[in-house]
Image: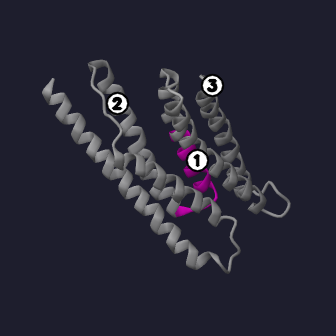
Amino acid sequence: MKHIPNLITLARLVLTLAVFVALLGGALGWCDDGGPPLYVLAFWGFVIAAVTDFLDGWLARKYQVESLMGAILDPIADKVLVAGAVVGLAASGDTTAALAGGLILFREFSVSALREVLAPRGLRLPVTVLAKWKTTLQLVALAAAILRLTLPAWLTPPVSTGIDIVLWLAAVVTVWTGIEYGLAARKALKET
């Protein structure tokens, strides 16, 4: 049981690659009938990967097998999943996902860099409750954006507006949590 959470995280990384390839293949028309079959695969792969994000941490806490490797791998796998989906959606021509996703990725990598700067000084930025909700919102928004690629043309316009709103909401919450982390880091640095 000790290694199962880390194995799930590693499986998420592999599944993320499959999601990205399916999105890219759909955008490039690798299927005879266009992208939708690959987009369906990408959607379900993304959903499974997103669920494993919650599952690995839950199992590690439940069975008290949290590890340093898991603490390092889990956020990396999260960022790779989000980045793969954003890049794949951008390749498919989803401008909103590309723009909102660009903000999301900027924040994700900025906070990671901030943590790297603080770590040698013995300072940590603990994950906030809002940041946990941010991750859920990102995953739901990106799953919805991938699902949009599978919808028939007649259904897309009304649903698309709702998906765009959720994508921008995820971007705003993501940037907000980045600002909170930046302020917390500044305060921690002043106190040392």
Q: Report the residue at 78% width, 59% height from top.
A: 37
Which residue is denoted by mark 1 in the rendering? 50
Foreground tag (2 vs 1): 1
* Spatial separation of the CA atoms under disc 3 and disc 1: 21 Å
Magenta includes 65? no
* SS class, disc 1: helix
Where disc 2 sits, the SS reads helix
Q: The disc labelled 2 sits on which kind of residue?
A: Arg
Three-letter code for the amino acid on which mark 3 is drawn: Met
Q: Position of residue 72 (x, y in %)?
A: 48, 27
Identify the residue at horizontal 41%, vertical 51% (top origin).
Answer: 133
Pinpoint residue 31: horizontal percent, then vertical percent.
82, 57
Q: Residues within 10 Å of mark 3 (few under 14, many from 20)?
A: few
Q: Quadrant of the C terminus?
A: top left
Give the extent of the magenta segment.
Answer: 79-95
Q: Which residue is mark 2?
A: 115
Q: Is residue 106 above or below residue 142?
A: above
Q: Are marks 3 and 1 in contact (CB under 8 Å)?
A: no
Which residue has dot 3 on it? Answer: 1
Left or right of 38: which side holds 133? left
Distance between the alpha carbons at the discs numbered 3 and 2: 30 Å
Instruction: Tell whether 117 sits left or right of 20.
Output: left
